[in-house]
Amino acid sequence: MEDSKNTEKNNKRKVRGEEESSVKKQENPTAEKRGSFQESIISEQIKKRPINKYRLLRRSAATALLAIIFGVIASVTIMVLEPFLSKWIAGDEPTQQRDAVHFIDSGDEVTPQEVLSDYMNQEADLESEESNPAPATQIPLTDEQIDALFAKLVLDQRDYRQIYMSMAAYTREMNKSIVTVSAITSDVDWIGITEQISRQASGLIIADDNIDVYILADHKPLIGAQSLKVRFSTGYVTEGRLKAVDAATGLAIIAVRKTDLSSELASSVPLATLGSSFAAIGTPVCALGSPMGSSGSIAYGMISASRSTLEYADTADAMLQTDIVGAEGANGFLFNFNGQVIGVIAPDQSKGDVKGLIWAYGISELKSRISAMCSGTPTIYIGIIGTYVTPEANQEYGVPYGAYVLRTDMDSPAMLAGIRTGDVIVRLGDTPITNYSDYVNALQTFNVGDKITAAVMRKSQQQYVELEYIMTARASGQIIEDD
């Protein structure tokens, strides 16, 4: 009985399930087909399309060829159109070629050998006069007679006034070539107010060309300047720009465009005349610029000592000591009483035993370096610190005339080549060298990177033999602008 009931219930469930299934098929007749279709897609395998290497290579070659053609066409187009585009962008302004830098050189340069030779000749003349007294017919004046003659020469205040008026007129003429260079920097204080700070240095109008006027000045007061103002002796003020700095001396070249000058200044630039720094001790000089620390100050004195500096390589800077007591920050220039510049006041005034006395770099040895800085040419460096061979050393010890090597800088081209203390350079390249100035000037004829052959005389077994060394020139100093 129970079995028959269970069988009947199962049959009813089966019938009900079939009816529900038939209803679902009627509502969604594609369901069964979709399931089988999805299963077929899942079971499919996607095959990669075979690569046609020939077609790929052909397309790559075509792309590269088109790129080359495009580059050639672009280059030709730029080359053809560049002059017209440059002219159109620049307008009608003509391009101006820079002429050679022009200096005024007195041309009466003397060498240390000539100074020493004159001194020795004077000594010989004095000895000759002592050994051969004057004939009896020439009666020398007695001290009383000399005093009587000088007693008749009485100078009053009018004579002193005339002397100083004459010297003032002389310095006014020399001051025409002196300018004041102001280094302008801006600073903001703690409450936000902007103020301008100005530091000054005296400058010398040293050279010019058809585009610029070049001014020599001490670089130390100008360090960190945001702008430079140049004030000429006429009161005219214009912009200047730092062109070059010499690493050895700390001197700088300031350039001023002639187009920025007044018509009067541009037509007649008051260039300073460069003289000779081999002045005899006792030569009267005047210091112009800022010898007393303030711009426009003047001091008079004389050359009290002279020596060659041993501090810088490849230079022959004669240091001139005066009896002028200057300010700690003195800068400016030494003039002789022929209107010629003979020295540039050195920034460091602690070179002598007597503190406060003004020292100056001799202008003779600076000429080639100043010319290189004005033209934007790097100063050549090989690292030799030398001096002159005196006539006494040549005659008594047989030292040949040339550039005597005192020492060489560490790791310099000269040291690496093998040049050492005691060598005498007698030829640099094809230029004969008879003194240290010849060496300094000849060095400036080379370019950075050149191979320089130096012929030196070296003492070996009580005689001098000639040797040759090859050095590679390096650059010395710092060129700020090169146009």
Image (cartoon, rainbow, N blue to C red):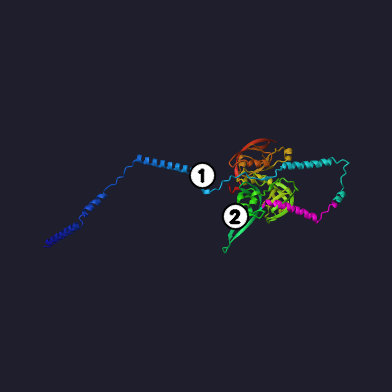
Q: Is residue 153 located in the magenta-colored stretch of the structure?
A: yes
| Label annotation for residue 227 | 2
* Position above or below: 149 against 188: above
SS at badge 2: strand
| Label annotation for residue 212 | none
Residue type at numbered disc 2 = Ser
Q: Point out the frontmost of discs 1 and 2.
A: 1
* Position above or below: 426 against 302: above
Residue sitting nearer the eye, 451 or 259: 259
Residue type at numbered disc 1 = Pro
In the rendered structure, the answer to whether residue 71 lies left or right of residue 125 reads left
Estimate the spatial distance between the alpha carbons at disc 1 and disc 2, rounded to whole Å: 34 Å
Q: Earlier in the sequence, mark 1 or mark 2?
A: 1
Q: Is residue 129 visible?
A: yes
Q: Is residue 401 located in the magenta-colored stretch of the structure?
A: no
Q: Residues within 10 Å of mark 1 (few under 14, many from 20)?
A: few
Region of the chain picked out in magenta, as a range? 150-178
Q: Main secondary structure of the magenta part?
A: helix
Q: Is residue 250 visible?
A: no
Q: How many marks?
A: 2
The answer to which image quadrant residue 114 occupies is top right
